[in-house]
Image (tube, rainbow, N blue to C red):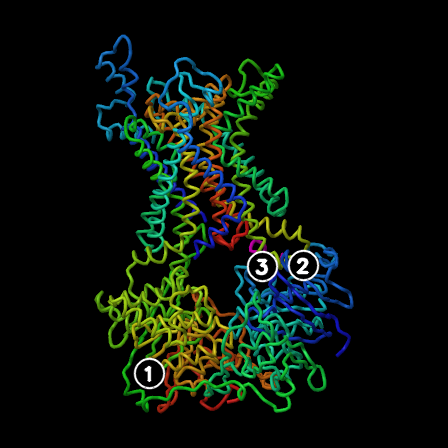
Amino acid sequence: MNEPILEVDDLNVTFRGGIKAVRGVSYRLGRGEVLGIVGESGSGKSVTSLAVMGLLPEGAEVTGSVRLHGKELIGAREEDLTRLRGKSVSMIFQDPLSAFTPVYTIGDQIAEAVRIHQKVGRDKAAERAVELLDLVGIPRPDVRAKAFPHEFSGGMRQRAMIAMAIANDPDVLICDEPTTALDVTIQAQVLEVLKTAQRETGAGIVMITHDLGVVAGLADRVLVMYAGKPVETGTVDEIYYRPRQPYTMGLLASIPRMDRPTERLIPIEGNPPSPAALPPGCPFAPRCPLKVDACDDAEPELERIGTGGRMSACIRSHEIDLKGLDGATVYPVPEAPAQKEERRPRAERETVLKVEDLVRHYPLMKGAVFKRRVGTVYAVDGISFDIAQGETLALVGESGCGKTTTLQQIMQLQAPEGGTVVVLGKDSAKLAKAERKGLRRDLQIVFQDPMAALDPRMPVGDILAEPLRAHGYKDAKAIQARIAELLTLVGLAPEHAERYPQHFSGGQRQRIGIARALALEPKLIVLDEPVSALDVSIQAGVINLLEDLKVRLGLSYLFVAHDLSVVRHIADRVAVMYLGKIAEIGAVDEVYGAPAHPYTRALLSAIPLPDPELERSRTRILLKGDLPSPADPPSGCRFRTRCPKRALLGEAEARKCDEAEPAVIRLAPAGDHGAACHYPENTEAVAAPGV
Amino acid sequence: MGAYLLKRLVSNVLLVAIAASMAYFLAATSLNPRAKYEGKQPPVAEAVVDATLDDYNLNDKTPVFERYVTWVSGVVTGDLGETWDGKSINEEMGRRVGVSLRLLLIGTLVGSAVGVTVGGYAAVKQYRLSDRVIGVSAFVIMAIPVFVLATMLTLVAVGINDTLGFTLLEYTGEYNPALSGWDQFTNRLNHLILPTISLALGQIAFYSRIQRNMMLDVLGQDFVRTARAKGLSRRSALFKHALRTSLIPAATYFAFAFGTLLTGATFTEKIFGWHGMGAWLVDSIQSNDVNAVAAVSLFTAACVLVAGFLSDLIVAALDPRVRVS
Amino acid sequence: MRSKVTLARLVRNPQARYGLIALVLLLALAYVGPFFGPYDWTDKDFMSFLSPPSADHWWGTTQIGQDVYAVTLRGMQKSIIIGFLVALFSTGLAALVGAAAGYFGGWVDRVLMWGADLLLVLPSFLIIAIVSPRLKGASWLWFVVLLAVFSWMITSRVVRSMTLSLREREFVLAARYMGIPGWKIILRHIVPNLSSLLIIDATINVSGAIIGEAALSFFGFGIQPPDVSLGTLIAAGSGKVTGYPWLFLFPAGLLVLLVLSINLIGDGLRDALDPGSNK
């Protein structure tokens, strides 16, 4: 490694009340180097970076050493730190909407960053802001510089954030989950911009993320954190291919992978410890499959393993190294329940949900004070699909594609604006009131946010009893018994019924949500991004539970998600949505194996894989620009404005894309695969790497 | 924007009309102008009273709806009717509106400007001594109703004047009509001091609480951290980014504060002997003067809606997110 | 469980602690104090008119020889009752109207909020003042009703906007997708989740109502004789404040203390019930 720019040594952060958020973090960052700091929520990774910037709120006690170019920052005078911030060290935050001041234009805010550290005039700074916006790939930067943050899309805002961060040619760029709030295709764009930014400035990058895929392709070295402490560090290849610390091993094993779809996911049992009540020994010991008695004696420190710079904090690391253990062998693989009977072919099974030409338009209102209608949002614009009994159909797409609206239209069981929704053979438009209520028994939902889905003022027992009481359960004993049964079914204990939702972790809350959906023994469950709010190690357990329940109870799922790896894992069929239309639909193997629509291909290629070598070698299909507004969709094919394929077509051929809207056409008479493209890809194996 | 403003104007005019009509009906059915004539010595003949009341459209023997129609047809032509003793409401109102508006304007300006400044300062100095002093004072002031405050101020003024032996602080009326020119101007200013304090103090306390809370909400937000991450000092981050943004929610309280100000002005006018609209309301209710009460209601409704409109305009000016471009 | 945490936080908050102590003392003074005074509030001492505070008449006497101590405490009782009743009614009304408008939306929302807007156009002081001549001779409870009917609008708007966001929360959607009727969802999920706001608001409304009563009574538009309230006493006292300050200072001082202590509790409640707010 060349001369380090940033050296962090034994950094500790303690918040008021003795909560130790960061305990003994050390790392070095060289010029042009990318260090990935990986950890789940609450692992202290973001606090570490704020401590380096000196931006922690008052009342946080920071000890240890942070040296920039050999100069100590901890305890330095505030004026000196102010001079360094944004000049030598810049930071990119997670949520780009709240990170910009809403009342000033983007251009002004970037120009301000320039003027703080450089003696230039107003005009010069404004010019420089436009240059920077151009550099990060914002179209018509001179016009966009005059726009306010709310007028930018999420991806554009994050680009602007990067532009602001590199305005003064920093030596160190700290990125705190810079793409977490973005869709995959936008994430791919922003990661490219980050690479550009690094090339321009030659800065060292500290990349903080929970997404092991993002780090795999970007980082040189990786630091894994757990419960405020670094547990393993090494080069990216070492960490991904030869993890030597059980937590890292488990984390890597729990990720659903597109290239290994059929394997059962391996969850890490339990939850991370609360930073206020750390166990005396190794904080990971309660969840560790390799735990021995000695683990509870003392917390293991980072120790060198083998030659080179890799370190691991586990008393059994050497043993793991010698035996060459990995997560898949160490962690118990939960067994899948056997399929009760051979499934009949799809065509012979009952259709539990049939959606045809569903349409939902919203009036577009503008302004909070001066409200008026300025147009129509074509949220869902004629989509059709069906679900057979015992099947999981995944509805995937990026934000704004209409998948949530579709789901709401189905759940409401009212006559849709256009088209039909038929649930279990009953047309939602023709339901009498009593019938509608009866149908609700068979159609249930699990929500995305396990925090918001449960009424915080009700104990879990009451939450589970609510659907029972609403549908005619009268006997208190029977209700009690059913609640206990449900809790056991989802892997919780009957005595949990007394507690309030706040006392459960995210994964447990999601299990309660699932139990509520199961209460009335439904036939079809709509799953609205059920695992996207959970950490990967927890997510695996919930996915397994959903798979088990489906088999045991003969359920059918409509699974709405944006994470294509999860979908690949859980779904039988998949429908890809773009701007209120279905772009491609079919059996998962066929769609993932041979994507025919250019959008599906781009989507699949944008997913970062937790495999450094694959990440380095693959070429991405980068889409241009943002999702067009659903209030003003392009004529003809909705994807044409960003379509990489259209750019390669001749003028006459391209005209068809502009003028005619493609319908979903079955690609091969035998297969279960259709795409809405005038020029679908040949159904040969392509794109998804590793398949 | 133009079409929007027009729509808004129409709906506001409608609201004023309905509110004023409501007030007219309430006043016409609750107040009894006849009482003014009945107790007289020597007694006035009923026919004479009826005729007089008919002249002023105040006769309770006429159905209330008929009186209302007469009143409305006057109002739309700009004639607000007559007081119970036959004086023109328009003339009286002409004299009084200026008096009230002067007080309201000064109260609003002083109250909001000083309040926002003090509140912002307290937020920056959170938990320091100055913040606590400001907080406690604001609480105490907000617990003192205007009529108590105004009475206390007169008590203090009397005390000071008595001790000094001359009138340092004026506490009754608007000005001394015996003076003229420059003397009258300074005399007017002197008369303004106590009413302004009594009216503005509550507003200052109110705005300072609002502004402090809004500012503290904003201080915890990501963009203030961003501003500091790019190298602004704490102070400039606070003033350039936090203060400006926190003015938006504070501005939405403007209309609300104005409502309390109107009520406060009634007491201020009454206690310091100003002949404004508020004092007139109290007097005319006490003298069963239906048309005057209706006129004051009309004026008040218009003021409230103008304030609400101004509040929206200020928010729109401060917040690019709510503008329609 | 939650209420215990809240109470603990409330007591730990110094503002709220002083407020609570002050309020308890004031309540004790209003309801227990009269038993210790040498005179009943209806007594008239024809030997001393307008006499300053003394050992016999602790807070002095009025121009008709009433004992200021006894009369003031009597007035305070009435003010307190009015404050609590008005707060109860108006907050309840605000919760129902706001939640219904926010939850059902559409024409229900438009009608209810239009009504609220209309009532906001004229200050409640003005409307009640106009109606007040009708109340002469009527029960003071009518006055409570009037105060409540004209003080729910702003809270209901806040409740409405919070309901709008609660309505989209997933636990409410879950209840709706279970087929639970709207009014049940409002009572079971929406109002309980607004309880923090409502409790805080009810507290602030108590002091608002006490001031409102006093303000109206100041001009004789409120409580009518022979009933007394702090407002009527302040009104009577303010005219003689320069010569006989005790007539004014005792009721006014108690009014300010009462309002201040309730406001302090309200502010402390806000901190205790809403740990997210940094105040």
Side of A219 relative to C72 (left or right): right
Q: Which residues are magenta?
A: A99-111
Q: Is residue A549 above or below residue A371?
A: below
Judging by the rendered image, the residue that carries numbered circle 3 is B222
Above or below for A675 versus B55 = below
Chain under numbered label 1: A
Of the pair A569 and A253, the residue shown nearer to us: A253
Sort mark 2 into few (<14), some (14-19) or many (20+) by Cα contacts within 10 Å. many
Asked if B139 appears above or below A632 in the picture, the reply is above
Q: CA distance from mark 2 to mark 1?
A: 57 Å
Q: Which element carries disc 3, helix, strand or loop?
A: helix
In reply to whether residue A568 is colored magenta, the answer given is no
- Cα distance, mark 2 to mark 3? 16 Å
Three-letter amino acid code at the position of disc 1: Gly
Q: Name the mark on residue A113.
A: 2
Measure how far apart labels 3 and 1 are at the Cα level.
46 Å
**Mark 1 closeness class: few <14, some 14–19, many ≥20 residues within 10 Å:** many
- Disc 2 or 1, which lies upstream in sequence? 2
User: Quarter of the image holding residue B94?
Assistant: top left
Q: Residue at x 67, y 70 (%)?
A: A24
Q: Position of residue A520 (x, y in %)?
A: 29, 72
Considering depth in this image, is B225 or B99 the residue closer to the camera?
B225
Toward the top, the furthest residue is: B42
The three-letter amino acid code for the residue at tag 3 is Asp
Disc 1: which residue: A390
Say which amino acid is labelled 2: Ala
Q: Is residue A109 in the magenta section?
A: yes
